[in-house]
Image: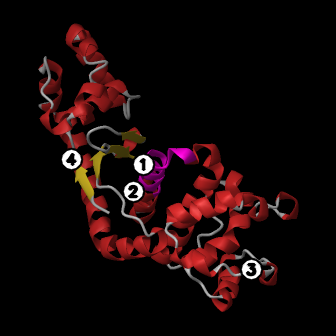
Amino acid sequence: MQLKWEINDYILIWELLFRASISKDVQNYKQKLWKNYKHSYNALTKEKGVILKEPKNYIPNDDTIFDIVRNSELYQELKQETEDYKNHFLKCYEEEKKNMEKELKQIIRLELNPCHILLLHPKLDIIEIKTGAEYFILWGRRKDEQDYKMALLNLIHIILAKKLEKSQPEYKEYQEIVQAIIELAIDNELATRILKKSCYLKGDHSLSFLKKQIYPYWLMYVGYTKEEMKTCMIRDNLPFDLEAYNYERELKNFDLYQFIRFCIRHQRNILKINELEII
């Protein structure tokens, strides 16, 4: 898992200019800028797509607005706050990288594509994915500053979901199953290992029924023995009748693609809606 953290002035300026203002000072600055340079300002409206084709090599046709903003005291403050945000992310990533990569590989048994993270000011509250010649995620969220470990886990969730969407388009018909398994992999199992506490009741509540049905097979996939599965049920507060399930030994040798296919192929046996309780 290779994550490259970057701040790109052009995309940061564009988002600050064309997104909802993150402060009164920013709003006033934008209004003044628009009033004085209306033509140049409006000309940038659709420039975001051009910037994202090659952020590092982007050269504007008219850099009037970019130069004015970049040299402003307000932008310098916002850029520094974005740099601080990036540094906190990097610190957490470097501390967790080795362990997180090891655990992730054990869980999904797949390689994730390298990904460029274009960090934005956290008050912009943006998550966007751009795919093409290169793969970018635009990322800036307020709540990350409360817990950078959880932010990294959320980022990995998004990267894995995009990988599955691009490489296995046939899964589209079974999106709920795929989403449930991504949650089990990242939001639940990986988070449990990284945070040292059970996270199995977390996630999209609309997927809870489905995840509970897949859960016994998921534990077999992860590689837990029957005795360990009993411990997991208690740990995760997700009891089920273990004797009612055949222990599928081959699952522990599957990768995540194969496990998804297994669940799709055997969904009639796995998805027993009438036997579920709300979790």
Of all residues shown, which one is farthest toward the bottom?
Answer: 227
Name the residue beneath numbered marker 3.
246
Q: Nearer the viewer, mark 2 or mark 3?
A: 3
For the residue pair 88 and 77, the one nearer the viewer reads as 88
x and y percentages locating residue 273 in the rendered image? 83, 58
Q: Amino acid at mark 1?
A: Arg
The 10 Å Cα crowd at callout 3, few under 14, some 14 to 19, many 20 or more, is: few
- Say if 19 sits above or below 127 in the image: above
Name the disc covering residue 80, or none.
4
User: What secondary structure is the magenta-colored segment mainly?
Assistant: helix
Q: Nearer the viewer, mark 4 or mark 3?
A: 3
Disc 2 to disc 3, C-alpha distance: 44 Å
- Say if 83 sits above or below 60 in the image: below
Q: Residue at x 59, y 70 (%)?
A: 199
The 10 Å Cα crowd at callout 1, few under 14, some 14 to 19, many 20 or more, is: few
Name the disc covering residue 145, or none.
2
Q: Is residue 158 magenta?
A: yes
- Say if 86 sits above or below 109 in the image: above
Name the residue beneath numbered marker 1.
142
Residue span colored magenta: 157-170
Q: Quadrant of residue 118?
A: top left
For the residue pair 248 and 122, the one nearer the viewer reads as 248
**Residues marked 4 and 1 touching at CB (< 8 Å):** no
x and y percentages locating residue 237 in the rendered image? 71, 76
Of all residues shown, which one is farthest toward the top?
Answer: 39
What colour scheme governs how the chains and residues are painted in the rendered image of this protein? secondary structure
Q: Earlier in the sequence, mark 4 or mark 2?
A: 4
